[in-house]
Amino acid sequence: MAVRTLTAVAAMILLTSLMAITYACAPTISSFSEAQAASKPNVVFIMTDDQDAASISAMPSVKRYLAAPGTSFYNSFVTTPQCCPSRATFLTGKYGHNHGIKNNKLPDGGALKFQGSGADRDTIATRMKAAGYATGYVGKYLNEYESGYVPPGWDRWYGYMGAYNSRQEGRPGKYWINENGRRKIYRFSEQHDTDYFSQRATAFMRARKGTPWFLVVAPNAPHSPSYAPKRHRTLYQNTRLPVTPSFNEADVSDKPQYVRQAPSISKRARAGLAEDHRQRLRSLRSVDEMVAQVVSTLRKTGQLSNTYIVYTSDNGWQQGQHRLTGKGTPYEESIRVPLIIRGPGVTAGRTRYEIVANTDWSPTIAGWGGASMPAADGRTLAPLLSGNPVTEWRQRILIEFWHGAAFAAIRDESRTYVEYGNGERELYNLATDPYQLNSMHRSPDQQTLTQDLSARLQSLKSCAGREACAAAEGADPLPEPQPGP
């Protein structure tokens, strides 16, 4: 590390003091001094695809390099349990009913809808770039992304093109990447896609040492068909499928129609789920290696102490709970996702139990970078990262889903309340029924509670903006995001 002169140190102290006074104002200039750059933290945001929260237990590097020195969030949820709407919420900080991406494909969703609506012109990328950050995106973007288009705000772009299927266009074993506007083709047999993403991510971090940067790394794993590199194909041979009390639920008479119509899981189907589970873990092992490589690169380049690392997923995944496989439901396995954060000032080895959501991800990052996201519905997680007591926080969030068995739901500290588009309802007391086996929506002594929750749900479904959504979520609006945890 270079030795600074007394003059330079004095200048940095003065500059830091001035920045503390003006930090709440979003920067509008594109050039920053070296001292300003040094005062800004880097951010690497890692988002997997369809990862259930429980699978973190099989990721030793995530536990060692992120959870142990960082803070984990037990009650971390996505507000729409589906890839494209959830990713749009990350980029904008908005609930789905405000950003308008309600499906994975046209006409209600997908990359073209996000671009055509103009939503891509005001995202965490454009905000961080305006705040003086170098920006990069590596991996899956939004569903149906297949063009040479590079969205606004990204300096370096390595976007995965098309569906996650190695037999695209009839040519087995290949995948397509938009590399800064140029379409490139790679073979899984020569370089697994997660390894490709890891290589591009670490190169980005090394090249931008000394400049504040924001990088998103979005591997496809463990999304089906859960490709694993050859070196991992024999792992987890004896690993069993996790079976909770809700697995292949016997009595679904209290459930909505789509669950009642789901057949019981046969022995053959169960065996298939078990192999799917093992394959998901195999695909995640390369992600775990990527996390270790990211941390190693940051350490070797002297950037680790000034870098926030966020690890999460775009939605969860059901593996036979309530007879269902997949996502897009209001059940815990579908909406709950891992969320782990390490970085400057973040309390090490701590688990927080407050309710947090993907609406909070970009406001948190913006706060670290001194940027502003005035249209976001979420809030910064900074108060939960320092270890200090937090007296005001949300009590509930909205979960939305618009197609198939469409629903809107409230998830609060101890309950899940659901209203379906066809008029059906569900109500679970998670304190006494954590596996959501017995819906209480028909119970006579729960009707007052149901009416109250229904009214609160209507407020959440129409909220827009930070103050209105904070009020609907049951907490006083918090101050604007500030730098640091």
Image (cartoon, grey):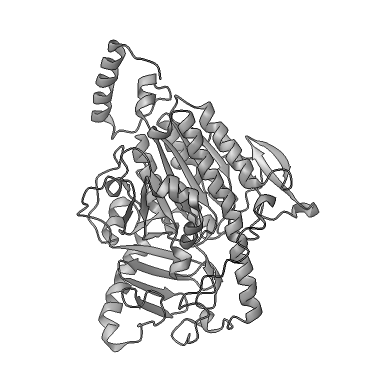
**Residue 289: x, y in percent?**
55, 46
Q: How many marks?
A: 0
Q: Nearer the viewer, residue 74 or 314?
A: 74
392 to 445, vertically: above or below: above
Using residue 82 as the reference point, say whether residue 388 is left or right of it: left
Q: Is residue 300 visible?
A: yes
Q: Considering only vertical position in the picture, is 481 above or below 455? A: above
Q: Residue 303 location in percent, x, y?
A: 43, 31
Residue at the image point whose x is 38% and y is 33% from the top: 306
The residue closer to the viewer here, 242 or 28, is 242
Q: Is residue 379 above or below residue 428?
A: above
Q: Is residue 174 left or right of residue 107?
A: right
**In terms of image quadrants, where is residue 283?**
bottom right
Q: Position of residue 63 (x, y in %)?
A: 44, 51
Residue closest to the eye, 3 or 405:
3
Split into 4 quadrants, where in the image is the N terminus? top left
Residue 462 location, quadrant: bottom left
Viewer can see residue 148: no
Question: In which quarter of the view is residue 275 placed?
Answer: bottom right
Query: Quarter holding the C terminus?
Result: top left
- Residue occupying image coordinates x 66% and y 42%: 177
Q: Residue 134, image x and y in percent?
A: 48, 30
Task: Name the residue at the front extreme.
Answer: 238
